[in-house]
Amino acid sequence: MQTNTTRDKTIDFIKGILILFVILGHTTLGLTDMYSFDDSMNGIANVIYSFHMPCFIAVSGFLYSEYVGNASQGIFSRICHKAFNILLPYVMISVIYWIIKFTLSNLIREPVAVSSLISIPWKTIEFLWYLYALFLIYCVAYMADYVFARLLPHFNYKMELLFVLFLIIALTCYGRFHYEGFNYIAGFQMYFYLGCLIKKWLDKLDNRYAVPCRYECACRGIRHNITG
């Protein structure tokens, strides 16, 4: 992970491995669609898809800084900052991706319709769902910080409570909303808080045993560079 001058290669390594799994997952699905494979190929894809995106979300939670109770920024400024960093690229890439697919509609397996361009603000195009979901997950985290800072400023188990809450939501509500954004929150917010908890527990171990934490750089510096 990284600070302003250093970079912890552990997180880079983890993200690199996850990116390889993303490529492998999409490759297995593509091969399954194009050729005849037995159920083992679908089984491989199912295993990969069961953990690679949740792990990406958990890494984002690990790198999240505002959970420590920093109230130096207002909730609106945080959301605007994240919209500029995530939501704006999501819209731009979605439009470019749609134009390419629409232009080459006769050469691709899944051509796009004009309606999919209009619905980009609330219905994602294929793999770009991740950026959209990540923006919503950050918004929920900012709002949770805002509520806890004003109602329970000294509550020490906020992350644990939020993880349990969204775990229950995932088990009971995932896939039941018409708006897919709610489904992203219901399905992935708990992994974000799981990453926050892992970081919190590592900090506690570091303080308790007074030994250098191998994630020490991450716990101090990358928040500013990644989450803003």
Image (cartoon, rainbow, N blue to C red):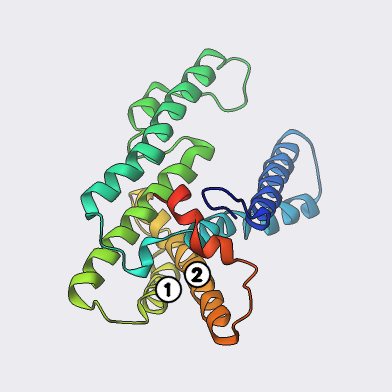
Q: Residue at x 70, y 53 (%)?
A: 13
Q: Is residue 183 left or right of residue 75?
A: right
Q: Residue at x 57, y 61 (%)?
A: 217
Give SS at disc 1: helix
Residue with the most extreme front position: 5
Q: Residue at x 69, y 59 (%)?
A: 47
The three-letter code of the residue at mark 1 reads: Phe
Q: Which mark is residue 194?
A: 2
Above or below residue 74? Residue 80 is: above
Q: Residue 36 appears in which quarter of the rendering?
A: top right
Q: Is residue 202 left or right of residue 64?
A: right
Mark closer to the chain start, 2 or 1: 1
Percent from the top left, x then y, of residue 54?
55, 59
Mark 2 residue crowding within 10 angstroms, few (<14) / some (14–19) / many (20+): many
Percent from the top left, x then y, of residue 194?
50, 69
Q: Contact (CB < 8 A) between labels 2 and 1?
A: yes
Q: Which residue is mark 1?
A: 163
The three-letter code of the residue at mark 2 reads: Leu
Above or below residue 211? Residue 20 is: above
- How many numbered circles does the render carry? 2
Percent from the top left, x then y, of residue 169?
38, 70
Percent from the top left, x then y, of residue 85?
39, 39
Mark 1 residue crowding within 10 angstroms, few (<14) / some (14–19) / many (20+): many
Above or below residue 211? Residue 33 is: above
Q: Residue 1 appears in which quarter of the rendering?
A: bottom right
In depth, the one of 52 and 138 nearer the eye is 138
